[in-house]
Image (cartoon, rainbow, N blue to C red):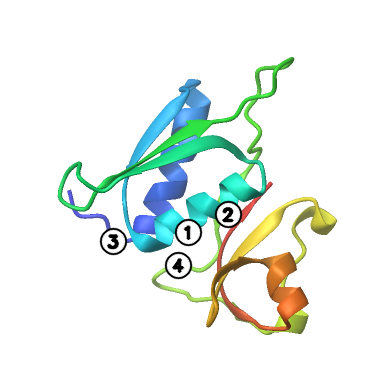
Amino acid sequence: MVVTDPIADYLTRIRNAQMAGHKVVEIPSSNMKKAITQILYDNGYILKYKFDDEAGIQGVISIALKYDALTKRPVIRELGRISRSGLRHYAGAQELPKIINGLGIAIISTSKGLLTDKMARKMNIGGELICYVY
């Protein structure tokens, strides 16, 4: 199966695993997916992750999903793609979106690598809006 938008596939696999109540989801690896996974972990949206570069052709990322202890609902309420292969979205440092008034994060591809909207605003650089999480 050929995936035309690997980042959208990555986000969809996480969404589907959460809806099904899975504890771990495995996703084919790439450098951008590894960077997104690291950002999700740093911001407390996932429990932990593991990169296995030996598995398969390109390697696999195993992500342990995080659920609320009381309600058993996923920590990630919504996960969506902003920029896609058919329509790219770019924003300067001043136009970076605030996801739910700063409660969520937007992941931006900048010249300094993948950053959250807060870090990109602090460094005063813009870039391509990849996705949002809250």
For disc 2, the marked residue is 39
Which structural element holds mark 4? loop
Kindly identify the amino acid type of the residue bearing the numbered disc 1. Answer: Ala
Residue drawn 77% across and 64% down? 98
Mark nearer the N terminus (1 vs 3): 3
Say which quarter of the image contains residue 17: top left
Relative vertical location of residue 47 with respect to residue 102 in this rendering, above or below? above
For disc 4, the marked residue is 84
Label 2 neighbour load within 10 Å: few <14, some 14-19, many 20+: some
Mark sitting on residue 133: none
Nearer to us: label 2 or label 4: 2
Contact (Cβ within 8 Å) of mark 2 with mark 1: yes
Say which quarter of the image contains residue 3: bottom left
Mark nearer the N terminus (1 vs 4): 1
Kindly identify the amino acid type of the residue bearing the numbered disc 2. Answer: Ile
Q: CA distance from mark 2 to mark 4?
A: 19 Å
Q: CA distance from mark 4 to mark 3?
A: 10 Å
Q: Is residue 71 left or right of residue 49?
A: right
For disc 3, the marked residue is 4
The answer to whether any part of residue 79 appears in the image is no
